[in-house]
Image (cartoon, rainbow, N blue to C red):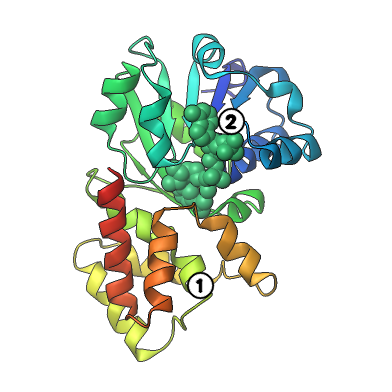
Amino acid sequence: MIKEDFFKNKIGVIGAGNIGRSVILKLLEKGYPYDNIQLSYNGSIFTFSALFDDNLVDMISDNSRLVNDSSIILLSVPPQSFEKIGDFGLDKDTLVISFMAGISIDKIKKQTKSENVVRVIPTGPDTIKNSCAIAGTYPGNAAADFLFDLLDFDYYVVDSEDKMDYMVIAGCLPAVYCRVDPHSNESVRDIQRFAGDFDEFIEISKKAEKLVPTDNIDEFVKQVSTPGGVTEAIISSLDQGNSLYDSLLAGIKRNNELS
Ligand SMILES: NC(=O)c1ccc[n+]([C@@H]2O[C@H](COP(=O)([O-])OP(=O)(O)OC[C@H]3O[C@@H](n4cnc5c(N)ncnc54)[C@H](OP(=O)(O)O)[C@@H]3O)[C@@H](O)[C@H]2O)c1
């Protein structure tokens, strides 16, 4: 695929929160035409203010117009908000790329009517803005992979959707390592336990260590903690004094509750 052809796609971003905005800003930085992107949000005044600051106000649309106009739809609403959007009525070929934790491809296909659904779980919005995001994606898809390359994702195409559960917690590791020392014997042991089910876990964990910021740590953790989401569940378990292993399991449990 060549860039000029890809850039002709109308992209609709449903949920212009932390992840949605960071993706849009990275696309613009890479030269994606402003007029070919629409976005929606849920009316928060804080989000409007952030959109204003980022000069994205002219992209604001509503879900039904955005769904009608777009050939690629990015879903970046909280998992709890997805069902409330209602039926999309898409053509079966419209590419839907979901950033949501927990919500299965099956469920997204049923609600959108698209048969062309890809899931991706990246590390947080700052890592996207800084071109150092690590991501897991399923299944492989040429157009989606083109987009992930454009966004500078270091991505792993996993071989089953179940593995996305591990990728969801792997994506939380930069925030987790703001709270626990990844080099302690306990952490090394706990991370190795997950590698039994997901080979790449140790490699991703090592990369995640490098994504821990040196300052504004609380703000970083806040930005990657979607309210009611998986990172929040892991951090709250760590704050209660549970081990890294048990806290990551709490993250998988929360992911399953959201699905
Ligand atoms: N944050 C991370 O590090 C991270 C990493 C990997 C995956 N994810 C996934 O990415 C998704 C977004 O996370 P986030 O941290 O960006 O959350 P967020 O900052 O809370 O953003 C979610 C956005 O969705 C909007 N929204 C809610 N209901 C909507 C609706 N019906 N129609 C249109 N927009 C709607 C919200 O609008 P308002 O602003 O008006 O409320 C908000 O702007 C989640 O599913 C999460 O699981 C997040």
Work out whether 68 lies above or below 97: above
What is the C-alpha distance between the residues marked 1 and 2? 32 Å
Instruction: Say left or right for 85 vs 212.
Output: left
Examine the image and state in which quarter residue 230 appears: bottom left
Residue at left 77%, top 38%? 54
Secondary structure under tag 1 reads: helix
Work out whether 115 lies above or below 119: above
Say few, some or many: other residues with alpha carbon within 10 Å of mark 2 (under 14 / 14 to 19 / 20 or more): some
Residue at left 60%, top 46%? 18
Can I make out residue 200 in this image? yes
Which amino acid type corresponds to the residue marked 2 in the rendered image?
A: Tyr
* Quarter placement of the C terminus: top left
Q: Name the residue under label 1.
A: 209
**Label located before the other in sequence (1 or 2):** 2
Q: Name the residue under label 2.
A: 41
Which amino acid type corresponds to the residue marked 1 in the rendered image?
A: Glu
Question: Of all residues shown, which one is farthest toward the bottom?
Answer: 185
Q: Residue 17 bears which disc, if any?
A: none
Q: Indicate yes or no: mark 2 CB to ligand 1 under 8 Å.
A: yes
Residue 130 percent location from the top left of the image: 66, 54
Which of 40/194 is in front? 40
Residue 258 percent location from the top left of the image: 31, 46
Secondary structure under tag 2 reads: loop
Which of 32/14 is in front? 14
